[in-house]
Image (cartoon, grey):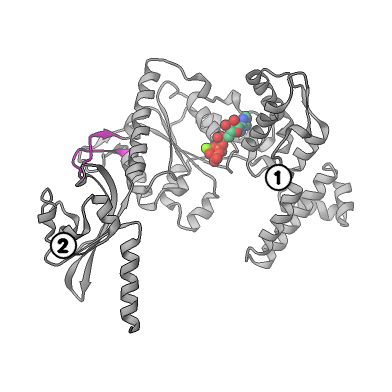
C-alpha cells in the first residue's frame, strides 16, 4: 500500500473512533463524513446520514439555524457554541460545538463540525444553580445556615503576616471594591472571603461561590450571566449567579482557570455594572461585589497569559495574600488547640494536648496542604483516640508523612526542574537554612554552627530569603 493511502486510512480510523463527534458536509450541504460518536450523540445511524442532504435528515433545522450550513454560507468559523437539543431518540443533549469552513484558496469546499458531549456537566451545573436559588430563597426566609458562615472571629492566628492579612480584609468588609485573595490550597482563602461578606454591610444579601475551574468556559458563562430562551437550541430562561447574588457577593474561586475570553466579558460587566444573559439583548443592572481567589502568583499568571492584565487591575483593588502554614509555624499550637476543642465537642472526646514529639514533628513538617491538612490530621486522630485518653500521640496520626522524607524527594524535583543554576542554588540554600533553623529551634547561632557558616552570614541570608523567624 502506498504510504499516503495508508495515512488516509489511518486518519479515517482515528476519526471514526475518537470520542468527540465529527460531522463534515460538502459545499452543497451533503454529509460526506459522520463518525460513530456523532451518531451516538444524535441518536441516529451513521448510514442514514452519510451522502444525504443535511436538511432532509434534520428537518427541524434550516439554513440559518444549522451551524454547518451557515458556516458553508459565510465561511466564518463558529467557536465553542453551546447547543441543547432533543436528539433522534428524544434524549436531551447538550454539546459544545466548533464549526470550521474547509477552504481551498478562496473557495469553500464544505464545513467540519466537532461536538463535545457535555450533557452530564450541563445537568449538574443547572442543578447547582437551581439549588442555589432555593438556598437563597431560604436565606431570605431567614432560615439560618449559621454553621457554614465564617466570620473574622473564626480566623485563628496571631502570626504577624496573617494578622496583617486580616487587617486588610477587615478594612475591605464595608467597601464595594473588588478583592483578590492569593494563597496556597487550604490556607484559608474561603474563610477570608466569607468573613468579608458575613461581617460586612452586605451580610443580609446572598453570598455565592463558583469555582471557575469546574466548568468548560461556555457553560460557565451561562451559569454566571444566565441564558435566554432560544439563545441556543433548547436554552431556557434562566437567571445566572450574578442576578441571584444581586446586592451581595460572588466568590470566583480559581479565577486563574477562567478562559481569557470570559475574563474579558467579566471585566466588561465589572466596568459597566450590568449583565446581558447569553443570547439576550436586555441590559440588566447588577450590584455585585466580586471576591476572586487564586492559588498561583498573580503576576506570574499575567506573565504566562493566564490572567488578563486589565482584569487583574480591576480585581486587585484590594489585595490579600494569605501566608502558607509553613510560613506561620508560630500559629500551629494555637490551631491545634482550636481544632482539638472543635472535635472534642463533635466526637464527645476529652483530649487536652498533643504529645511533645508529635508537636515537634508538626513544627518540622512543610504542610503542603496548609491548615486544611492540619485540621484533617487532627480530625483523623480524634476519631481514633479512646474516650479516656487525654494526649494525642503519634500512634493516632495515621497517614502523617513527616516532611523530612518529603524534603528529599523535593531535592530531586528542584534539581531536575530545568531552572537556571543560580535559582537552583538559591532554592537548595533556602531549604538548608530552613532545615537547620528547624533543627536548632530557631536559635541563629546554633543554626549557623550546624551549617558551618558565620552567624552574620546566616543572618544576611535569612534576610535575603525572607525566612520568617
Ligand atoms: N485561620 C484559620 N483558622 C481556622 N481554620 C482555618 C484557618 N484557615 C483554614 N482553616 C480551615 O482549613 C479549611 C480550608 O480552608 P479554606 O477552604 O479557606 O482554604 P482555601 O484557601 O480556600 O483552599 P482551596 O484553594 O483548596 O480552595 C477550612 O475549612 C477551615 O476549616
Ligand atoms: Mg477555597
Whether residue 324 is visible, yes or no, is: yes
Residue at image x 18%, y 74%?
106
Task: Report the quarter where the N terminus lies.
Answer: bottom left
Above or below — where is 40 with respect to 325?
below
Judged from this view, the residue extending furthest toward the bottom is 2
Name the residue: 49% across, 24% down.
198
Q: Is mark 2 within 8 Å of ligand 2?
A: no
On the image, the x and y values in percent for residue 175 come to: 46, 30
> Is 463 left, or right, of 133 in this rendering?
right
**Ligand 1 quadrant?**
top right
Q: Secondary structure at mark 2?
A: helix
Q: Residue at x 65, y 22 (%)?
A: 342
Residue 434 placement (x, y as % from top left): 77, 49
Q: Quadrant of residue 365?
A: top right
**Magenta residues (range):** 224-239
* Whether residue 157 is visible: no
Q: Is residue 58 above or below residue 241?
A: below
N-term-proximal mark, 1 vs 2:
2
Q: Position of residue 284 (x, y in %)?
A: 26, 34
Give the quadrant of residue 135.
top left
Q: How many residues crowd mark 1 within 10 Å: few (<14), some (14–19), many (20+)? A: some
Reading the image, the residue beneath label 1 is 366
C-alpha distance separating marks 1 and 2: 58 Å
436 w.r.t. 154: above or below: below
- Decide: marks 1, 2 in contact (CB < 8 A)? no
Q: Would residue 227 be counted in the magenta stretch?
A: yes
Residue name at image x 85 percent, y 55 percent: 451
Residue 272 counted in the magenta span: no
Which residue is identified by label 2? 74
Q: Position of residue 210 (x, y in %)?
A: 42, 37
Ligand 1 within 8 Å, label 1 CB: no
Front-most of residues 430 and 68: 68
Amino acid at each position: 500500500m502506498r504510504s499516503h493511502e495508508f495515512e488516509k486510512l489511518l486518519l479515517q480510523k482515528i476519526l471514526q473512533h475518537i470520542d468527540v463527534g465529527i460531522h463534515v458536509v460538502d459545499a452543497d450541504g451533503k454529509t460526506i463524513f459522520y463518525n460513530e460518536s456523532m451518531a451516538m450523540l444524535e441518536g441516529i445511524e451513521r448510514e442514514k446520514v452519510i451522502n444525504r442532504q443535511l436538511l432532509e435528515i434534520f428537518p427541524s433545522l434550516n439554513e440559518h439555524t444549522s451551524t454547518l450550513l451557515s458556516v458553508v454560507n459565510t465561511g466564518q468559523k463558529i467557536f465553542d457554541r453551546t447547543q441543547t437539543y432533543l436528539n433522534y431518540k428524544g434524549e436531551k443533549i447538550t454539546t459544545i460545538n466548533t464549526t470550521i469552513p474547509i477552504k481551498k484558496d478562496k473557495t469553500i469546499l464544505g464545513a467540519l463540525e466537532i461536538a463535545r458531549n457535555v450533557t452530564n456537566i450541563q445537568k449538574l451545573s443547572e442543578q447547582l444553580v437551581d439549588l442555589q436559588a432555593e438556598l437563597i430563597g431560604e436565606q431570605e426566609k431567614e432560615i439560618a445556615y449559621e454553621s457554614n458562615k465564617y466570620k473574622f472571629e473564626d480566623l485563628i492566628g496571631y502570626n504577624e503576616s496573617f494578622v496583617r492579612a486580616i487587617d486588610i480584609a477587615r478594612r475591605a468588609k464595608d467597601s464595594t471594591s473588588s478583592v483578590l485573595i492569593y494563597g496556597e490550597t487550604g490556607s484559608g482563602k474561603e474563610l477570608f472571603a466569607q468573613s468579608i461578606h458575613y461581617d460586612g454591610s452586605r451580610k443580609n444579601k446572598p453570598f455565592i461561590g463558583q469555582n471557575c475551574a469546574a466548568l468548560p468556559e461556555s457553560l460557565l458563562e451561562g451559569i454566571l450571566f444566565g441564558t435566554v430562551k432560544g439563545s441556543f437550541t433548547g436554552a431556557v430562561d434562566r437567571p445566572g449567579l450574578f442576578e441571584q447574588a444581586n446586592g451581595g457577593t460572588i466568590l470566583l474561586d480559581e479565577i486563574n482557570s477562567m478562559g481569557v475570553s470570559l475574563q474579558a466579558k467579566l471585566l466588561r460587566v465589572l466596568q459597566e455594572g450590568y449583565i446581558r444573559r447569553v443570547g439576550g439583548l436586555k441590559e440588566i443592572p447588577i450590584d455585585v461585589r466580586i471576591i476572586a481567589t487564586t492559588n498561583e502568583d498573580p503576576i506570574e499568571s499575567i506573565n504566562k497569559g493566564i490572567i488578563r492584565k486589565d482584569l487583574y487591575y480591576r480585581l486587585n483593588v484590594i489585595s490579600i495574600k494569605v501566608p502558607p502554614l509553613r510560613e506561620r509555624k508560630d500559629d500551629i499550637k494555637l490551631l491545634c488547640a482550636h481544632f482539638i476543642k472543635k472535635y472534642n465537642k463533635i466526637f464527645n472526646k476529652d483530649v487536652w494536648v498533643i504529645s511533645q514529639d508529635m508537636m515537634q514533628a508538626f513544627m518540622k513538617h512543610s504542610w503542603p496542604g496548609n491548615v486544611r491538612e492540619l485540621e484533617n490530621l487532627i480530625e483523623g486522630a480524634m476519631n481514633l483516640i479512646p474516650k479516656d485518653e487525654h494526649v494525642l500521640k503519634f500512634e493516632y496520626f495515621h497517614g502523617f508523612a513527616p516532611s523530612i522524607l518529603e524534603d528529599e524527594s523535593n531535592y530531586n524535583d528542584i534539581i531536575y526542574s530545568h531552572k537556571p543554576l543560580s535559582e537552583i542554588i538559591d532554592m537548595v540554600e533556602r531549604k538548608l537554612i530552613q532545615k537547620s533553623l528547624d533543627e536548632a529551634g530557631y536559635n541563629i547561632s546554633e543554626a549557623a554552627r550546624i551549617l558551618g557558616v558565620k552567624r552574620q552570614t546566616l543572618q544576611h541570608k535569612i534576610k535575603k530569603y525572607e525566612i520568617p523567624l
